[in-house]
């Protein structure tokens, strides 16, 4: 942790020759009128949603309607001074409860302790008031002043408003800080769009923001792990100015002062540093069709993987928004200039993907499913993520009785990664909506979508959002055996549930026998660690000429393939067939060539035990274990070490060759690339070769 010195002028970073720092685009609020609302919407959509850069609307405090007196610290002290608030001690990492008035009176004193001589000291107290509920009078006045399309719970600009009131997440908050307080590098929850306005500050008060474009977030995450040894998903590291100078991405900087209204693109990594005696800001998030598209394209799965709480009920929001828009389209003919058609066309593919992921296998028997009333608040006992519809529940693990029983419910995202409860009891299937109801709604949405395709007046909207004008098929057609190209999470969950039933008690930490090396049957054991595993712990290549087996621990750490990626593939090919195997024998033989010697992304591991239910366990591989010894530096590594260890592939030790450059890439490899002996030698059906996060 390297603090920013008091009074540092961040603008000088952008003025240095060859700098990859950029100042954010600014718009003067005094130029915005009701007559220019359409122009502002175009700037906002272009700058924030399409280009992915932050946008600052400045000088709101100079507008005639700005009620500056209610935003002052004196007003807070007089009206809410006795209110108890949680103050975060950034040095100790603890929360203490104090009165708001006491904290406001101490900010100037706390700020004065930071000087150019001692600002790096870890002993300096840093007390930050975060996530205080925004006063209702602030909400009303800001709602009257700021552009409608950017405000909290706006009916036309925030899909959170489509949820029933009891399901909405309260996220309009206040932040009060002083010199030296900060927020580590993070992304807004569920890829929502962030809004932050500084409503008041001392004469020397301001905030410094560092922001990265959403398109660069994967590159930044890899750099955080491999160079800084930090994980962006954990949101606990504040990158120094020197760190940002070395970052492999462009960085946008904002010096936020009173009246500056900052809009943050969805999934944009950013961090904040407060300067001066006092800064007071109001902040809120909005969910739009564009942000939900980003969220469901990998960010939500990454969040579940890291066990970060999902407060926004994303999939339920998509469903509720579709119902609301469909009702409006049935009542009123759509306007070609209206946003309602654009929102519907953006949301429809998302809802269709949700439905396809929840569809059972067309090849396996349909399991018995228990229907429960849609409670919306059911969360996964492992990752704490919200569950939209189908999930699995252990009948043997509830804590308590009756309505107060704490059931062990697991979402399909976690179950397909090998996460579940510790007991061997087969879980039961549960759903919150009757499947026929969702099918009927999907069919209704599909018919509306196909009607919009026929209307030539909407051609420009299709082009603008990058959606092809092709007729959508029914759900029954898409989920039929001849049309499925990748197994759904429900299908993979069925496969794993059957395997758990067939091999009770067999898990990653189960007992195993280490055979004599001379007697090892390479076709019967893991090709890398040479150890016998229960059939549920390994996967066998689908190539009839190969049939080699690899345990999930090795595939995750050396190739960044998790169990779901592998089991969802209709035609999985092993690293040996792809000539990417990093075991000592394959590297020594030279059969892999240069293609096997690529960088493997570093995963630092997530200590999920600290946040998951105590009844939880990872059965197939340990994601809490890092893969540093599998990640390799750039180079061919011809002089590689042949150090060998024995292991079950879980990461504690490994029988694979740990040479300095043998790791196969999980991010740089195009898995659709033909590098085998013939055209059948492909890893799986990921044609695009894109990779973000842990293969979700």
Image (cartoon, rainbow, N blue to C red):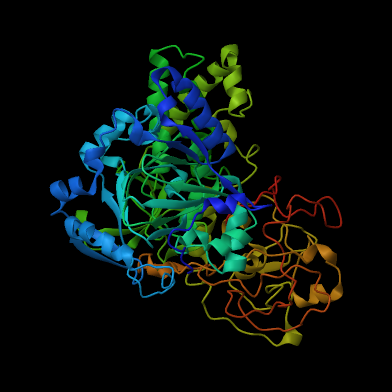
Q: Between 223 and 90, which is closer to the camera in this rendering?
A: 90
On screen, residue 95 versus residue 511, left or right, reads left
Residue beneath the point at 71% across and 69% down = 663
Provide residue 66's location: percent of width, then percent of height.
29, 32
Residue beneath the point at 22% across and 39% down = 69
Q: Count all numbered tags in the image, as a single digit.
A: 0
Decide: is 114 above or below 687: below
On screen, residue 670 versus residue 282, left or right, reads right
Provide residue 580's location: percent of width, then percent of height.
77, 64
Residue beneath the point at 44% across and 11% down = 333
On screen, residue 434 versus residue 17, left or right, reads left
Q: Is residue 537 visible?
A: no
Q: Between 530 and 64, which is closer to the camera in this rendering?
A: 64
Provide residue 213's location: percent of width, then percent of height.
57, 46
Q: Is residue 126 visible?
A: yes
Provide residue 374's location: percent of width, then percent of height.
31, 41
On screen, residue 563 versus residue 373, left or right, reads right
Q: Between 650 and 478, which is closer to the camera in this rendering?
A: 650
Decide: is 496 above or below 258: below
Residue 477 quadrant? top right
Residue beneath the point at 86% across and 71% down = 590
Q: Between 86 and 339, which is closer to the camera in this rendering?
A: 86
């Amino acid at each position: 942790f390297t603090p920013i010195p008091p009074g540092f002028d961040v603008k000088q970073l952008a003025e240095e020759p060859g700098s990859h720092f950029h100042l954010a685009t600014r718009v003067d609020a005094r130029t915005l009128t009701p007559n220019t609302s359409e122009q502002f919407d175009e700037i906002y959509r272009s700058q924030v949603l399409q280009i992915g850069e932050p946008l600052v609307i400045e000088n709101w405090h100079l507008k005639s309607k700005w009620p500056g007196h209610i935003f002052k610290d004196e007003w807070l002290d007089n009206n809410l001074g006795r209110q108890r608030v949680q103050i975060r001690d950034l040095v100790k990492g603890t929360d203490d409860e104090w009165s708001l008035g006491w904290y406001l009176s101490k900010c100037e004193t706390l700020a004065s302790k930071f000087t150019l001589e001692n600002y790096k000291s870890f002993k300096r107290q840093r007390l930050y008031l975060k996530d205080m509920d925004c006063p209702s009078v602030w909400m009303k006045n800001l709602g009257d002043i700021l552009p409608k399309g950017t405000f909290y719970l706006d009916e036309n600009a925030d899909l959170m408003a489509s949820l029933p009131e009891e399901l909405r997440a309260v996220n309009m908050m206040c932040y009060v800080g002083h010199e030296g307080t900060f927020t580590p590098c993070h992304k807004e929850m569920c890829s929502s769009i962030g809004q932050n306005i500084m409503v008041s500050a001392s004469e020397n008060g301001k905030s410094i923001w560092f922001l990265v474009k959403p398109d660069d977030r994967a590159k930044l995450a890899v750099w955080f792990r491999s160079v800084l040894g930090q994980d962006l998903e954990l949101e606990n590291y504040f990158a120094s100015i020197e760190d940002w100078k070395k970052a492999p991405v462009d960085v946008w900087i904002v010096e936020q002062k009173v009246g500056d209204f900052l809009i943050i693109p969805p999934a944009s990594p950013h961090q904040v540093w407060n300067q001066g005696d006092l800064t007071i800001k109001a902040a809120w998030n909005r969910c739009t069709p564009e942000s939900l598209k980003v969220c469901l394209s990998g960010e939500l799965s990454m969040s579940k993987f890291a066990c970060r709480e999902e407060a926004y009920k994303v999939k339920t929001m998509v469903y509720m928004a579709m119902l609301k828009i469909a009702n409006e389209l049935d009542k009123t003919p759509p306007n070609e200039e209206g946003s309602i058609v654009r929102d519907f066309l953006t949301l429809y593919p998302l809802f269709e993907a949700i439905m396809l992921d929840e569809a059972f296998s067309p090849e396996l028997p349909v399991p018995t499913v228990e229907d429960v009333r849609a409670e919306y608040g059911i969360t996964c006992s492992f990752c704490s993520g919200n569950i939209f519809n189908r999930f699995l529940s252990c009948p043997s693990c509830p804590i308590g009785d009756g309505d107060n029983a704490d059931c062990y419910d697991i979402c399909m995202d976690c179950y397909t990664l090998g996460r579940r409860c510790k007991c061997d009891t087969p879980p039961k299937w549960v759903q919150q909506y009757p499947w026929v109801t969702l099918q009927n709604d999907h069919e209704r949405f599909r018919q509306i979508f196909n009607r919009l395709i026929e209307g030539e007046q909407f051609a420009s909207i299709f082009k603008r959002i990058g959606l092809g004008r092709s007729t959508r098929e029914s759900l029954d057609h898409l989920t039929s055996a001849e049309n499925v190209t990748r197994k759904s999470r429900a299908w993979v969950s069925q496969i794993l549930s059957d395997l758990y039933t067939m091999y009770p008690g067999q898990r990653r930490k189960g007992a195993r026998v280490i055979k004599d090396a001379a007697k090892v049957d390479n076709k019967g054991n893991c090709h890398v660690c040479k150890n016998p595993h229960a059939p549920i712990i390994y996967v066998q290549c689908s190539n009839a000429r190969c049939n080699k087996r690899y345990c999930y621990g090795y595939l995750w750490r050396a190739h960044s393939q998790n169990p779901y990626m592998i089991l969802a593939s209709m035609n999985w090919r092993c690293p040996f067939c792809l000539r990417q195997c990093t075991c000592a024998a394959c590297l020594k033989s030279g059969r892999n060539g240069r293609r096997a010697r690529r960088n493997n992304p570093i995963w630092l591991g997530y200590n999920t035990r600290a946040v998951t239910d105590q009844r939880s366990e990872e059965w197939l591989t340990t994601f809490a274990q890092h893969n540093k010894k599998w990640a390799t530096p750039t180079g061919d590594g011809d002089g590689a070490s042949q150090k060998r260890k024995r292991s079950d592939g879980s990461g504690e030790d490994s029988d694979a060759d740990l040479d300095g450059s043998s790791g196969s890439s999980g991010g740089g490899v195009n898995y659709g690339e033909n590098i085998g002996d013939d055209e059948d030698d492909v890893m799986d059906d990921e044609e695009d070769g894109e990779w973000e996060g842990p293969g979700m």
